[in-house]
Image: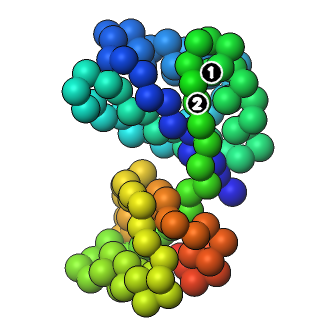
Amino acid sequence: MDEEITIIAPQRVDLLADISEHLGNNNINLKSILSSLANEVAIVRLVVDSRDAKKAKKLLKEAGFEPYGAQVLIIKLRDRPGELAKVSRMLSNHKISVDYIYLINKERDYAVLAVKTSDYEKAKKYLKEYL
């Protein structure tokens, strides 16, 4: 299982270097990272193994960041037209909204995605064939 850690901080030139060095120097491996900028505020989303999440959040807090965690589902879809629509519709039909989604990796004929939903456990149940 994986956990996402989000850091929202003022953008600065060494922000990503500070975050990644602090975690890397303490043996925290990143499974995925997504960083974006909105009005000079950086939003950094890190996916780590859930066994490392508590330690990672503690380390980031000690480094002066305000990390918060969220459970995300890591799903693997066939890389072909309509697959995301199928999964999105399935969730929608069960009244589960997708808060956000992003691509982690493409492996041969598959796309690996991180999905944050309105109901983690319910989504996990319906997406079990994609986990």
Residue position marked by numbered label 1 in the rendering:
60
Image quarter (top left, top right, bottom left or bottom right) of the C terminus: bottom right
Residue 8 - label: none
Residue 131: tell me if it is visible: no
Left/right placement of residue 97 relative to residue 25 reads left
Q: Nearer the viewer, residue 110 or 125?
A: 125
Quadrant including the N terminus: bottom right
Q: Which mark is residue 67?
A: 2
Q: Position of residue 62 (x, y in %)?
A: 68, 14
Q: Secondary structure at mark 1?
A: helix
How packed is label 2: few (under 14 Cα within 10 Å), some, or many (20 or more)? many
- In this rendering, is residue 112 above or below 32? below
Seen in the image, is 24 located left or right of residue 8?
A: right
Residue at 38% over, 33% down: 43
- What type is the residue that disc 2 sits on? Pro
Residue 98 as seen in the image, left or right of residue 23: left
The Cα atoms of the two marked residues, 1 and 2, are separated by: 7 Å
Q: Secondary structure at mark 2?
A: loop
The amino acid beneath tag 1 is Leu
Residue found farthest to the bottom: 93
